Image (cartoon, rainbow, N blue to C red):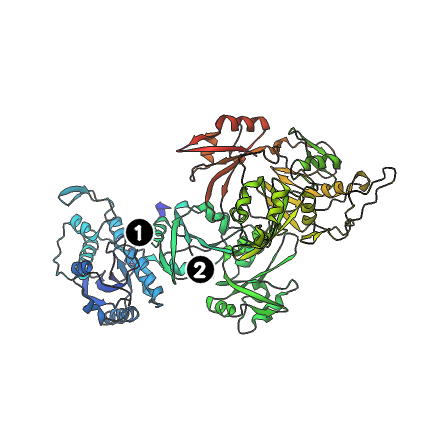
Amino acid sequence: MKGNYLKPSQHYCDILVLFHCVTTGNGSSELLGSDESDVVVIVWQLIDLNQNQTGDIHYIYVQPSINTSIKKEWSDSTGITEDMLSDAPTFEDAIHQFEQTLRNELNDQGKTCSFTLCTDGQCHLRQVLMPTSVRWETTLPDFCFSFFDLKKEFCQCFENIQNHMEINGEQQSTLVGPFSVSEMLNCLNVRVDEFGTYGVDHVRRMSSVIQVMISDQHGYLFTSPERIVDRLETGPCMTSDVIMDDTVVRARGLPWQASDHDVAKFFKGLNIPRGGAALVLNPQGRRNGEALVRFENVEQRDLALLRHKHYMGNRYIEVYRASAEEFHKVATGTSCEAIHFLSKEGDAIVRMRGLPFCTTTQDIIDFFGEDVPIAHGEEGVLFVKYADGRFTGDAFVLFTDETVASEALNKHKQTLGKRYVEIFKSTAAEVQQVLSRHMTSPLLPPMPASMQIALIPNGQQTLTNTPSQVNQSLQNIINPGSVRNCIRLRGMPYSATIEDIMAFLGELSPFILPHGIHMVLNQQGRPSGDAFIQLLSPEKASQAGLDVSKGGCHKKHMGERYVEVFQCSGDEMNLVLMGGTLNRNGMVPPPGMTILPPEQPLVATAPLHVPQIATPTSPVTSPFIIQTPHGALLMQPSLAAPQAQYSTQLDLLQSQALFTSRNAIYGQPTYLPCAQYLPTPPVSPTGNTGTPVSSLAGAVPVSTPAGAVPGASISIASCGIQVRMQGMPYHAGVPDILAFFKGYNINSSSIKLLYNDKLRPTGEALVTFSTLEDAHRAVVENNRKPMGNRYVELLLM
């Protein structure tokens, strides 16, 4: 507490080493080093704090890099020419000479004394000396990581003085810092003779200011130096950590193999707290070349922004402001396994990908061998698993330091068992992101198989287990049947987007039905390279299925891959999603299933014999989740309903299709594991003509409480109806949306802002209303209403 605070009675050290450096670029104390210019002069002077005596001023010229050219204007203003620098020592030799001369001068005093550097501002050490040591791969002396900032010390010394100083002929208050050294001298009414030697005169002015501060008149003590953290402390960032918005930046353009230590090296000189460097992963779990970095305070965050377009190797890195919320989404996690793994002592992490599913911890230890020891033995290996416990083929391995980790990278693409293994540098944030993505709780709750949610065309929501009602609703959405107005795209790049598909189809893209593009994901939520497209007519689908040499799209290239195109119907689409095969030779149904010919009559008096798809003890799960612009199309066999209820084989197939389109979900949803911060799927095109495939109000999956009777009435009115907002200003937030819909019954939990794959706002949001009437009234009354200087379009989902 303040009452118990004891004021220090002596200086932190005996000697202050006044340190000043000159670069070939901007010489301002606030912008020094922001242009990555080379150091060309190092100047220093000793001052005895106890005796208030100064030593000689020393300076060393430093040879710039080969690519540096000395501008005439700079040379004229500083008096330093290229000839003076051509024979100067290199940066590494200059630092060694500086250290030797400094220690020799201290030894000449005949006594043991401690010393600390003192600079005019933060930039000389944090922005110049530290980054230059990285570029020249030079190790700096330990005393370079502790210093006093003369600007801050001057403000503390004279914080209670209220006199005036004259600057440019005008009287101004003294306490308007940060001060320049010349302003400090004016404030103290001190005159210093100058000799015209650039850099040397500046150090003489600094020593004059300090001598006044430590004089008997003011008696100021230098007690608390600043520290520069030389080593990144790896570890988990907890959700309970308080992070300020003005301490985070986003670094963009990183090399794909960069680690958190590489990011810390790029920002060397600026203190990054534990777990403060987080590499960002894309929706496919791979790095996207960005990192979110947290600093100790706003001052160092501002210095980090000055490193915009500085180089990491041969690539320049863009640095922008970011928010604490963005950092929390990427760097923090709730996985206990990840937190336990990251809490162990170890400085470097690597990620192994492509491991055989039967791999054990001992296999990984043997793979690296005795030459590359794993920290903490078996506890230094963390396998990544899905929520159901299945192995993903990935693992994280902890090493004691970066040197050992670099040796581990030499085993990249070596064989373990019968598979080659990929090895990459990793970070604590990547461990959190990967485990959170694979081990997260299901976003869609399960529902008993006998419980079906049917959607009546007039928008009424009912619960039923009658397959005929489900089939009638399905026809309004995906239009199952034998009409072959759909095409299947197979072999697309995993990064393919809606825009890529539109460009691929070319002149056929205007004939895509509204919301008719369906991207297929596998059960891990990753792109499968497949998509289903609904077109206006079978003729257009047939044209798209022609070979590219005949004017079609079959085997046409999308990026670097050629894509196969097959014409199909809604029935065939469903069969493919259940595990069937569709190619140029026709349709092959899923294993254990046969399709009845359409001309074969069914005898109503006899029990219908339907081929068994699976037994209750060994269900055949569907291999795909189809991602539509408004949700997911999930396929899974339904085993609870009696087979005698189905009138046709097609009814049986359709009752097993689980659709989410316009927020309408039918049947029992499976798990859809994805992190909450991932972007929503892109919106497929909406045609100018025709009506949407479905204009039905949405329902959501409903779970039956334990002990409830299947088929009982369950209220789902609380799920609400969604309205999509498009065209908002990118800076718009939840308060802006609440003000936009003022007077409607919504709150902050009803609003979901949408972000793209780079975690930037898309200008879109989803707003949930309690009833269809409220949602319809909101769209009618507020469509194209301005928000700021932009008008917003509203779409009823």
Q: Residue 335: in sight, yes or no? A: no
According to the image, label 1 marks what residue? 7
Give residue 750's position: percent from left, percent from top.
54, 34
Mark 1, secondary structure of its residue: loop
Sequence-wise, the earlier of marks 2 and 1 is 1
Position of residue 570 in the picture relative to residue 79 (left or right): right
Residue at position x 62%, y 39% in the image: 661
Residue farthest along the front direction in this orientation: 550
Which part of the image, by quadrant, shows the C terminus? top right
Q: How many marks?
A: 2
In front: 567, or 173? 567
Tag 2: residue type? Pro
Marks 2 and 1, Cα distance to the nearest angstrom? Answer: 49 Å
Q: Residue 765: in sight, yes or no? A: yes
Mark 2, secondary structure of its residue: loop
Residue at position x 23%, y 64% in the image: 41
Give residue 610's position: percent from left, percent from top.
81, 45
According to the image, label 2 marks what residue? 255
Q: Are marks 2 and 1 in contact (CB under 8 Å)?
A: no
